Image (cartoon, rainbow, N blue to C red):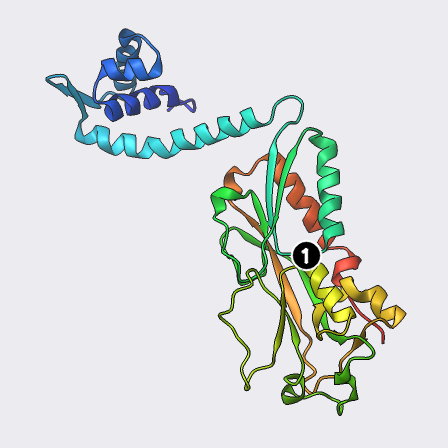
Amino acid sequence: MSAIPQTTLEQWAVLRTVIDTGSFAKAASKLNRSQSSVSYAVSRLQERLGVQLVAVTGRKAHLTEIGRTLLAEAIPLISSLERLELRGKAEDTLGHARLRVVVDPVFPRPVLLDAFATTKKTYPQMEVIQYELVRGAEPIEPENYDLAIPISNAVTDFAHPLTVINTLMVACPNHPILDLKQPLTRDALSLYPRLQIVGHLDDEDRPTAANAPKWRVNTFDAALAAVRHGLCFGRLPIYLIEDDLKAGRLVPLQLATAIKHQVRLMLVYADEQNASPMARLFASLLMEACRSELLETQTVRV
């Protein structure tokens, strides 16, 4: 048996169009071809296979039983080739292409920006759409991004472990919570506003007498500013507050339950099988950076 297929995807695509439109004439119009060329493509396909795929009743073209079976198997191949061609058209000789990235804001921005900068050297005309998705916000569907960096329990399909972000509960040096008996219990923590970073600022989660009052913001910049000014205490990524800890602008809180709190992040492809070379390059740069000592050994000496 020959290793080279005797039929072409073009022939199968013409057959699909004939069936979708219902006739050879309509298929010819849709494909901007002559009716004779459409008929020839289907005829050659049937000859190569040695079976009748299509029959005509009146003016209506329809598949035979074997035609339905074989075309159903060919359609995924046609769709894959169409996606491949569209991706190729998006990346012209100047390296022009679009990269859509959804990222949880806990991921270090310098690492993200360095990966963008390195990718841009290979694709100098690339267009970037970066969207920060805070936990609790409406999720973004895979068709609206190429790569995502969510917390580990947000998305699982096509996901690869990326990095672990260590966090620390901190307050400013003059916060009254530091006057309480250490280590701090849950009841003690509930006396003062606690930082909460959310995707939308609704009123569904109002504080009650039994709950700790919350200081809700939707960006890490706002979160850090609020804690620095003593408006609340809260848990922040260690990499973000290292300078504040060294300068004494923030101090760690000693908790009664000494549990190391970590945020695990994943790297998620919207469609890994058909991901563009640019998306794969960007993803590999992120994976390489996250294997470095910078992110693997986040420790604070206090």
Quadrant position of residue 49: top left
Spot occupied by residue 119 in the image (x, y as percentages of width and height):
71, 37
Spot occupied by residue 9 in the image (x, y as percentages of width and height):
38, 23
Compared across the picture, whether 230 is left or right of 204 comes to: right
Q: Is residue 183 above or below residue 172?
A: below
Which residue is at the front of the view, 7 or 193? 193
Compared across the picture, whether 47 is left or right of 59 comes to: right
Q: Quadrant of the C terminus?
A: bottom right
Q: Which residue lies most toward the left here?
A: 58
Spot occupied by residue 134 in the image (x, y as percentages of width and height):
59, 58
Q: Is residue 297 visible?
A: no
Label 1 amino acid? Phe
Q: Quadrant of the N terminus?
A: top left
Q: Which residue lies most toward the right here?
A: 247
Q: Is residue 300 above or below residue 37?
A: below
Label 1 environment density (alpha carbons within 10 Å; few <14, some 14–19, many ≥20): many
Compared across the picture, whether 68 is left or right of 297 comes to: left
Q: Is residue 84 above or below residue 14?
A: below
Residue at image coords 84%, 67%: 244
Q: Is residue 65 visible?
A: yes
Q: Is residue 123 above or below residue 138?
A: above
Quadrant position of residue 17: top left
Task: Label 1: state its secondary structure.
Answer: loop
Which residue is at the front of the view, 100 or 161? 100
Spot occupied by residue 34 in the image (x, y as percentages of width and height):
30, 7
Q: How many numbered callouts?
A: 1
Which residue is at the front of the view, 165 or 15? 165
Residue at image coords 57%, 35%: 276
Quadrant position of residue 43: top left
Compared across the picture, whether 283 is left or right of 25 comes to: right
The residue to which callout 1 is attached is 107
